[in-house]
Amino acid sequence: MTGEGPDLGKEPDDQATPDLSKQEPGGRARETIGEILRSDHPAVVTVLAVICAMIVGAVLIVASDTPTRDAAKYFTAAPGDTFSAGWSAIKNAYVALFEGAIYNPSSGQLLSPISETLVYATPLILAGLSVTLAFRAGLFNIGAQGQILMSAALAGYIGFAWHLPAGIHIIVAIVGGIVGGAIWAGIAGFLKAKTGAHEVITTIMLNYVGVCFVNWLLTETWFQAPPYNQAVSRTIDGNAQFWHLFGSTMRVNFSFILAIAATAFTWWLLKYATFGFRIRTVGANQDAARTAGMSISSTYIWLMVVVGGLAGLAGVAQILGDANNYQITASVDGGVGFTAITVALLGRGTAWGTFWAGLLFGALSAGSGQLQVATATPPDLVQVLQALVVLFIAAPGLIRLVFRLRRSKAGGSAVLAKGWNG
Amino acid sequence: MSPELNEKREDVVESSVATVEVAPGEVVEQHVVELKQSTGRRVGTGAAFIVLGLIAAVVLGMSAGSHSTSFDLNGSQPGISVPKFSVPGVGVIVACGIVIILLGAGHLLRSYSKRTLRWAGIAAGILFLVAFLTWAGTEGKQSVQVGSLLQQTLFLATPLILGSMAGLMCEKTAVINVAIEGQMLFGAFAGALFGTLASNWVGLIAAVAIGALVGALLAVFAIKFTVNQIILGVVINAFALGLTGYLYDAIMANDGTGTNQPIPFSPIKIPVLGDIPVVGSLLFNQTIITYLMYVIVIIIDVMLLRSRWGLRTRAVGEHPKAADTVGINVLRLRYQNVIIGGGIAGLAGAALTIGSVGTFNKNMTSGQGFIALAALIFGRWTPRGALGASLFFGFASALQVALSLLATPVKIDSNLLQMLPYLATIFAVAGLVGRVRAPAADGEPYVKGD
């Protein structure tokens, strides 16, 4: 059950392509680019989905804009006022998003919006990779939140309680974070493999257990920061903090390099590693995997360990990077766990797809801050846009129908999220 | 090994609907071989019972206070009250523990069938809770408020029950509904908004309507565009969270009294039934939403097994091709059930606003839709199972509030206490439920002639 439905071949707009072989070489190359633009190539669908989402978003902006609504009261007398008020509301909102995420001519720091985008994107990419990897084996990891919390708690504890020399300290803290996430997800994998307990239930429950556990830690004097009146942990040592990539004025730090490395690792794992082949086979067809002599249960367990390790890296980025003042709180995960699911969906089950999806969502999140500062449009607009983009991409049939695209071989989706019986 | 291998089951239609011809309402008698646990798992499960019993008898028994525990069965609502009663604390605790140990020993010596094991598990859980509540009251300072605990349980479980029924409606026709959370959020928002602008009855209708509308969205994308249904659910949740948050800021944040202050429904006492001591004030002095919940649960439970609609729904969920062959309109039935399910989820959302405090807050469902989904899976896709699981979650949340008000013999950290329901669910799912089976075609789009 991928997004590629078997009925799509029957759509009325799916006509035979014109015979290209008769055309001369130059014309043919031009036709090929034209073909791609009019086909449902993933890149084309993604761009169109973003445009569709922005159009729906524009409707929301106009509907909630007070000047536009005031102007609409005398719409019949002066319709132009309504349109110009609506247009300026839309323009202001999207310009603010752009300025917050990519480039702000009025700010002194040219690169600081990009830096913010990368800071927001890093945990999204890492947790997104975790969800993507689980998807490929047919598992649904809703537990990234709990895995991030446990990882941040362990990495953070190592960060503030152990005092190790520079270099060693940060490595130990990173390993601690990976182990924290891996254990938390590994529990779900173990229960799935050994007892058949459904990972959707166990990972949701482990999220709650993780939240309660961190809340408890934050009331213990050996964990909480003095004077013990706020639910924050002690601050981690400088030795365990990631160094900034472009000076301390910009928050982007080494954790983004980790995200790139983790993406490359996941890509390699899925494409070349034997274990990745096992993951994909189990995801595609359990019976075939079993017949070929693969152990389903050991695949599940080790897969979830890796999945948790990736989510653990997201926790490491949140606590050792400049994202939360180097202190653990109960919201140190920043809601990344659930957004990561949409990132993974947008990434269509591939490592680099997830990377670019994480960057896009990171940019939108970074832009929402500027949206709040500069306009009257509520920043929740960004969440609506994120959901709409994925909705339009998840339904390639809809985008094809609206824009009368042709079906191509590159279309469709590689995401393998099975039903409950998978 | 056991004479109970063959067991008569009435609900057998459920698992073999594609092969057994049944007239609506007919009870089919068929012999089903109950599978037993493997020896390794049996030892593990039995040991878990015994450990639980030992915890009850030894840990709770040793740390209990010296007083006897008094229980108060009356809720906060007026009605005929029953007197409080006291039990000898340590005696009851140790007795409960011993019975749990005996249940476990019975499984080790003489393997229970899966069905018996489930009931033994439920019995052990209840006994443990009795022991725990008795222990909590042995300081003798306050009596244990069982009445208000149960009242709170029903109150907190109502949205979960409705949510899991919404999921059940969809999944029995093989459309996975992960979007319960989003539908609830929309329902809660519409309930508060229209409840303020017009009246709480309009709010109720608006909540159901918007839930059904989101259900229709789910249905169109899942059935017409054959989008992966888990993806779809997650996306609808994100969309609901974003849009209700956006509209909250745009409409409610600036004008709270004009748009976000509905008058919640007040309880309606049913004559005669409401006068029964304890049970009456607990079950029959409730708001309209709770009564609707009773009706919905009973209708779904009866209709699913004993009506033409139920038979067709289950057929479409298990084997849509076979259902299509005998002339059932698979897609129309799926549309219908998913939209009705959405309406029920909208009602679940209304329970959170106009059925409770009234006002809407951003992300006020806070994962309850997912808990409802877990309850559905935990309850093995049956109405009764989902009801029981939802009540369990409601009870666990209510218990945690009740215990924080009680002077227990050993002070329990409230954060660690909050973990208990979730840990108990993990243990229950791993140990007692195990591999669950969803409707066979769940999540698969149906394409005619494929």
Image (cartoon, rainbow, N blue to C red):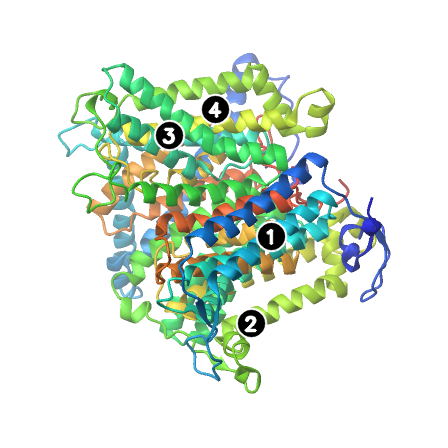
Which of discs 1 and 4 lies nearer the camera? The answer is 1
Q: Residue at x 63, y 48 (%)?
A: B223
**Disc 1 residue type (three-letter):** Ile
Q: Are marks 1 and 4 in contact (CB under 8 Å)?
A: no
Decide if residue A9 is on the left or right side of residue B19: left
Q: CA distance from mark 4 to mark 2?
A: 47 Å
Distance from Cα at disc 2 to Cα at disc 3: 44 Å
In 3D space, how far apart are the residues under numbered discs 1 and 3 (Cα atoms)?
43 Å
Separation (CA) of disc 1 from disc 4: 50 Å
Kindly report which numbered mark, 2 or 1, lies closer to the viewer in this rendering. 1
Residue placed most toward the observer, A86 or A333: A333
Q: Chain of mark 3?
A: A
Q: Secondary structure at mark 4?
A: helix
Find out whether the residues at labels 2 and 1 contact each other: C-beta distance under 8 Å: no
| Callouts 4 and 3 on one subunit | yes
For badge 2, the amino acid type reads Leu
Q: Write down the residue under mark 3.
A: A314
- What residue is pinned by disc 4? A351
Label 4 CA crowd tier, 10 Å (few <14, some 14–19, many 20+): many
Q: Are the two marked residues, 4 and 2, in contact with CB atoms closer than 8 angstroms?
A: no
Which residue is label 2 attached to? B292
In the figure, is residue B125 to the left or right of A159?
right
Whether residue A168 appears in this view of the structure is: yes
Does B102 sit above or below residue B288? above
Separation of marks 4 and 3 at Cα, in angstroms = 15 Å
